[in-house]
Amino acid sequence: QVQAVESGGGLVQPGGSLRLSCAASGNSFSINAMGWYRQAPGKQRDLVARITSGSTINYSDFVKGRFTISRDGAKNTVYLQMNTLKPEDTAVYYCNVERRVSGGIVHHWGQGTQVTVSS
């Protein structure tokens, strides 16, 4: 099993910045990728950004140019730097860890951290 623990959410004004962190522990030697998803009330959970163990990065269109994902492989930690935040970025942000197993990939989720963008 893998445990993912997020930190860094909070309340910020429009145009502000926040940095999220997610540390993976446990059976983390077979991590394929780590990433961030978000879910606003009444909406589905959407990919925000993802980074593979080989450092390939994917961003959703709605955060390109504003958010930056990075990772510290030695610490099994992924970061999400969020700049120029907008009210529509308000959501619960979830860390996702993809672990390789025989036959495929298993997803592990953090508990979520609330990000609220409001004046």
Image (cartoon, grey):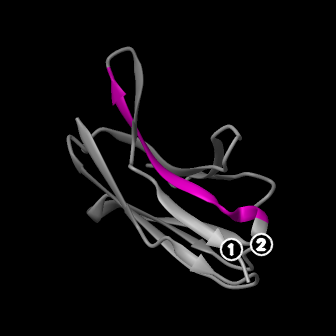
Q: Which mark is residue 117?
A: 1
Residue contact between numbered discs 2 and 1, judged by CB atoms under 8 Å: yes
Left or right of residue 80: residue 17: right
Is 105 rendered above or below residue 10? above
Residue 44 appears in view: yes
In the image, the segment drawn in magenta is 88-101
- Circle 1 SS class: strand
Q: Which mark is residue 86?
A: 2
Corner quadrant of residue 87:
bottom right
Corner quadrant of residue 45:
top right
Q: Whole-percent x and y of residue 69? A: 56, 64
- Circle 2 SS class: loop
Residue that lies at the very extreme toward the top in this rendered image = 103
Is 77 rendered above or below residue 108? below
What's the residue at 48%, 69% (across, down)?
A: 20
- Considering only order in the chain, which callout, 1 or 2, is on the residue closer to the N terminus? 2
Confirm whether the magenta stretch covers residue 29: no
What's the residue at 39%, 49% (across, down)?
A: 111
Is 73 rendered above or below residue 25? below
The overriding secondary structure of the stretch rendered in magenta is strand
Q: Whole-percent x and y of residue 1? A: 22, 35
